[in-house]
Image (cartoon, rainbow, N blue to C red):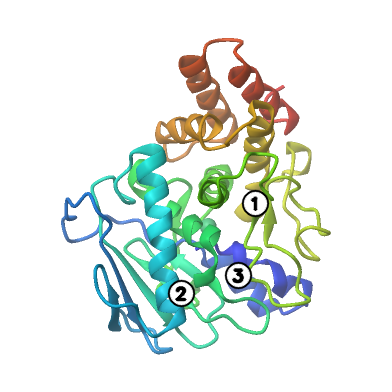
């Protein structure tokens, strides 16, 4: 999911090393194409299963498209929020589900024991119930959109972006098969945060100035912090959590850093560009980011993405237009471009 989303934060602040490791490592699970050919429906096709705190998928069907609301709150939230995220991709980018072809979205709730994560495992959404530090994932629209966006990446960029298979011996749970590394992996994470924030802004019809630019402000337990990440102020512990090490410029970047720390650099560039362009972030900045992202190779670096966004901004709005200048200034601000 957004793992480090949830991923790293609280644990580290409290020195729970094991928890922290898990938060850092989970995030992305699988990138293989689904075995079944997707249905071609124009309408969302959602189903939710209850795994009853086990780890065996799919679990018991508790909610389906057109059916009665589930009695379970988590199941109903997973269903509703997936619907909002799918509507965002459809209405803003004309994308029909994560694969562009109406892939049915399956969600499993109550996965594992005190499982403090949500994720896209390459085929479906999986939600744990969390623990005393972090939880309530199904209530968090941005977290759900973040995870579904990993699915979008899987289909947009053949082979994935910055994805590496985890050796069986290093897996902490069954569904953990892949991890993200390097700048490519950080771009993958950042795209999910940008889309997560945009879904929330789009749903609330917020302008760039009205938006809080936070990710996961609903998942941290009381006393753990306000949010998991901030696109506006990456690594600012006062608006996120104690121990947040997200980066806001290349001055802080080092080889081998966590992709959820490095993702702050391109995410902050998006924030900077969107603020300069103004209005609704999804209308111009969001389209520039989405179209540029679609053209990346699986080993793309920050500078590659920066150049791709500039090319799209120039194509859509013209050289030296406000959006083109804003995108250029944003990448200079985070020191990806000189
Ligand atoms: Zn993620």
Q: Does residue 232 appear left or right of residue 55 in this picture? A: right
Residue that label 1 marks: 256
Q: SS class of the residue under badge 2?
A: strand
Residue tagged 3: 23
Counting from the top left corner in percent of width and height, residue 134 is at 64, 76
Q: Residue at x 62, y 36 (%)?
A: 270
Cα distance in 3D space between marks 3 and 1: 17 Å
Q: Secondary structure at mark 3?
A: helix
Q: Position of residue 183 (x, y in %)?
A: 58, 43
Residue 201 spot, x, y in % from top left = 57, 48
Q: Earlier along the polypeptide chain: callout 2 or callout 1?
A: 2
Tell me residue 63's x, y (percent). 30, 76
Q: Nearer the viewer, mark 2 or mark 1?
A: 2
Marked residue nearer the N-terminal end (3 or 1): 3
Q: Secondary structure at mark 1?
A: loop
Mark 2 Cα-neighbour bin, 10 Å: few <14, some 14–19, many ≥20? many
Residue located 59% across and 21% down the image: 323
Place residue 133 in its image quadrant: bottom right
Label 3, ligand 1: CB separation under 8 Å: no
């Amino acid at each position: 999911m957004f793992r480090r989303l949830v991923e790293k934060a609280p644990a580290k602040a409290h020195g729970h090393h094991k928890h922290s490791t898990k938060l850092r490592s989970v995030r992305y699970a699988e990138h293989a194409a689904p075995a079944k050919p997707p249905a071609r429906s124009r309408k969302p096709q959602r189903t939710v299963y209850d795994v009853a705190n086990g780890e065996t998928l799919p679990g018991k069907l508790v909610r389906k498209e057109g059916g009665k609301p589930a009695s379970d709150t988590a199941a109903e939230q997973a269903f509703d929020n997936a619907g909002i995220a799918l509507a965002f991709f459809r209405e803003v980018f004309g994308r029909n589900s994560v694969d562009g072809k109406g892939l049915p979205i399956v969600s499993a709730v109550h996965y594992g024991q005190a499982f403090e994560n949500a994720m896209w495992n390459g085929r479906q959404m999986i939600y744990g119930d969390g623990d005393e530090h972090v939880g309530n994932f199904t209530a968090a629209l941005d977290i759900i959109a973040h995870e579904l966006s990993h699915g979008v990446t899987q289909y947009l960029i053949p082979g994935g972006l910055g994805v590496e298979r985890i050796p069986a011996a290093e897996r902490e749970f069954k569904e953990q098969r892949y991890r993200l590394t390097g700048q490519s992996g950080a771009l993958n994470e950042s795209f999910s945060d940008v889309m997560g924030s945009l879904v929330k802004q789009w749903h609330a019809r917020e302008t760039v100035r009205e938006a809080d630019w936070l990710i996961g402000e609903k998942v941290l337990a009381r006393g753990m912090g306000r949010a998991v990440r901030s696109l506006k102020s990456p690594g600012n512990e006062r608006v996120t959590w104690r121990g947040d090490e997200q980066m806001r410029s290349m001055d802080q970047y080092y080889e081998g850093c966590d992709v959820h720390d490095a993702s702050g650099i391109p995410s902050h560039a998006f924030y900077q560009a969107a603020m300069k362009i103004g209005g609704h972030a999804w209308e111009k900045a969001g389209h520039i980011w989405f179209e540029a992202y679609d053209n990346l190779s699986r080993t793309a670096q920050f500078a590659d993405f920066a150049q791709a966004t500039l090319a799209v901004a120039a194509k859509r709005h013209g050289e030296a237009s406000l959006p083109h200048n804003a995108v250029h200034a944003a990448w200079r601000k985070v020191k990806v471009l000189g």
